[in-house]
Image (cartoon, helix red, strand yellow):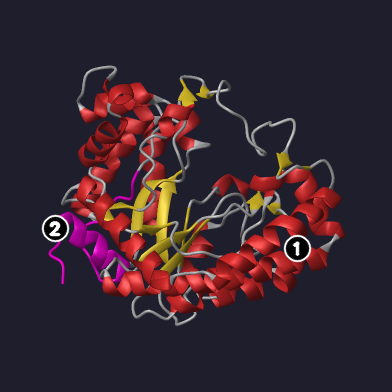
Amino acid sequence: MLAYSEPQQLALDTIARKPTTGIPSWLIHVMDIPLIEEVAGVPAGTYLQEPQETYILFQQKVGTNLLDQFIPDNPLTMTGKGYDSRKARGPTTGQERIELDGILIDSPEAVVEHLKKIVFPRLEKAIREFDVAKRCQEIIEKERNIQSLLGPDILKSGYGFIAFPCFRYTLYGYQNYFMAYALYPEVIEKDFQLQADWAECHNQAAARAIIEGDLPRLHRLDHDMADSRGTLVDFRTLKERWLPHFERALRPVKTIPGMNLIWHCDGNLMAMLPALIECGVKGFQGFQYEDGMDYEKICRMKTKDGEPLLIIAGVSVTRTLAYGTPEQVKQELAYLVENGPPVGLFLGASSSIAPGTRRENILTLIEGLRYYRTNGRKK
């Protein structure tokens, strides 16, 4: 068994749903470079020269207990006013012409053509040639390397190494992909099936890595499937075409003793939550309360086995941190604590904190996280 520091143990006990005195902090991903440097206590310009080192120092100074997604270079994609438009554009960030493997993606039919000619054969080949032992060792090595970089007081949990079927809008763009979803359901379901076939192989490796590498029994699944109105497609079609393959893909990992798969919520996912729980998801992160995510109702839900859900609750980055006052930040933190689950609660921000967010609000959040780590639910 590995030895853990007190801050790491607080995170582990929370994952295990043990009663704790303090409430641990999840990472806060600030993308305001001057503020990262200020909190890290380094001279201006240090982040641009040493982004990884400065980002880690920021997380250490903030007092982060748990970090899953490690993206220290991500703030480099931003300017003081938001996304750097000088960067290369992709299918979901304004790319005007999408051409893949010699096929111009200008219609839903082009999406279907590329799936059949290119994607399906690649997936079938990848399934035939998948090396479980090799991938297992790659996962262990990467997770241990990041843990070493983070230092002894931050626990690295899982992100990105458990696979499941996803929408392909990042490949084809929203318009043509979702037209294909509506017009060619049998082709889209074939894609979900093959993605799940590959994911089952991959997740056998992930399960071995978690057990053999003694990795934390927590992994965050992240794929945006909703906007402020609800799921991106009619949920009834997801239940028919996607959900069975999603559940099958997770089978190798969800049966690991003590394993917790949690889902990143973006937009209004209320309609999906019961189905995700039924598939074995045991918690949620990233609530857009203003879009209809009912925090109190979610925190009263139970896992399929009747346990409290693991909840990574965050002060809203699109409402409170962006437009509120320090007092409102304090009030929202208190609300999240008072209405959160009795055990299994982490605190942070609801998502990435964009440049231009009020400095005093972010500093109030950092101070509030410090308070709850020490005092827990005490008033």
Q: Amino acid at mark 1?
A: Ile
Residue situated in front as seen by the camera: 267 or 66? 66
Q: Which mark is residue 142?
A: none
Q: Amino acid at mark 2?
A: Glu
Could you tell whether 31 is left or right of 41 in the image?
right
Q: Which residues are magenta?
A: 1-27
Q: How packed is label 2: few (under 14 Cα within 10 Å), some, or many (20 or more)? A: few
User: Which residue shows up at 86% across the image and 51% down it?
Assistant: 109
| Quadrant including the N terminus | bottom left
The spot of residue 253 in percent (x, y) is: 43, 75
261 up-or-down from 267: above or below: below
Percent from the top left, x then y, of residue 376? 24, 55
Q: CA distance from mark 1 to mark 2?
A: 47 Å
Kindly identify which residue carries mark 2.
6
Q: Between label 1 and label 2, give the one nearer the viewer.
A: 1
Q: Secondary structure at mark 1?
A: helix
**Residue in the foreground of this view, choosing between 324 and 118:** 118
Magenta span: helix, strand or loop, mainly? loop
Looking at the image, which is closer to me, 66 or 327?
A: 66
Residue 19 painted magenta = yes
Q: Secondary structure at mark 2?
A: helix
User: Which residue is disc 1 drawn over?
Assistant: 188
